[in-house]
Amino acid sequence: MKTAEVSSIVFRKLKPLGATRKGRSTFVLETPELLKSIDIQKSDFSQLCYLNYSFTLKRVPTGGLKTHLMKRATSKDPLIKEQIDHWLDLDSDSPDPERAQGIDWIIDEIVLPEIQTINTENDLKKFILTLPTMNLVPIRLREHYGL
């Protein structure tokens, strides 16, 4: 499987939710206050792909950054993280139908629960306050929220 095929699987899953394609591997869901992006990033060092998702406040300049807040689809549970990496490693021996089901699972269980519950500036602030450290939040966004 190639990165383009991973991209197609992700878009097939997100298109019914109103996502639009922005480039070959970025998909955007928009609310009146936010841009929510899902991006497939290929590792520079291996055949591993990363499934990133991010939030950008429309009324706050990014100050040269691509987005205000980015997360990667992963898990603290080492077994789940290993399985995610297996599905997203283009060199793994995972058959294409199994890989596609795995990517669907990643989107359903990790990405969408956060993407779909964060729709306003206030939702994003509440989410930020649950993060283990403010170091994950760019200064511009911390300043905007007074954190």
Image (tube, helix red, strand yellow):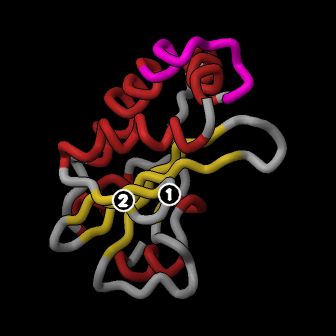
Q: Split into 4 quadrants, where in the image is the C terminus?
A: bottom left
**Which residue is under mark 2?**
21
Q: Split into 4 quadrants, where in the image is the N terminus?
A: top right
Residue at image position (52%, 19%) is 99
Could you say which disc has been placed on residue 24 in the image? Answer: 1
The span shown in magenta is 90-100
The kind of secondary structure element at disc 1 is: loop
Neighbour class for label 2 at 10 Å: few (<14), some, many (≥20)? some
* Rendering quarter of residue 128: bottom left
Label 1 – label 2 distance at C-alpha: 7 Å
Q: What type is the residue that disc 2 sits on?
A: Arg
Residue at image position (45%, 57%) is 26
The kind of secondary structure element at disc 2 is: strand
Q: Position of residue 36 (x, y in %)?
A: 33, 60
Count of labels in the image: 2
Q: Is residue 5 magenta?
A: no
Pick the residue in front: 9 or 36.
9
Neighbour class for label 1 at 10 Å: few (<14), some, many (≥20)? few
Pick the residue in front: 122 or 55.
55
* Rendering quarter of residue 72: top right
User: In the rendered structure, are the residues bearing label 1 and label 2 in contact, judged by CB atoms less than 8 Å apart?
Assistant: yes
Residue at image position (64%, 20%) is 86
Q: Position of residue 70 (x, y in %)?
A: 50, 58
89 lies left or right of 124: right
Q: Can you say whether 21 is above or below 81 in the image?
A: below
* Rendering quarter of residue 121: bottom left
Pick the residue in front: 136 or 59.
59
Q: What type is the residue that disc 1 sits on?
A: Arg
Residue at image position (67%, 29%) is 90
Pick the residue in front: 18 or 139.
18
Q: Position of residue 115 (x, y in %)?
A: 30, 48
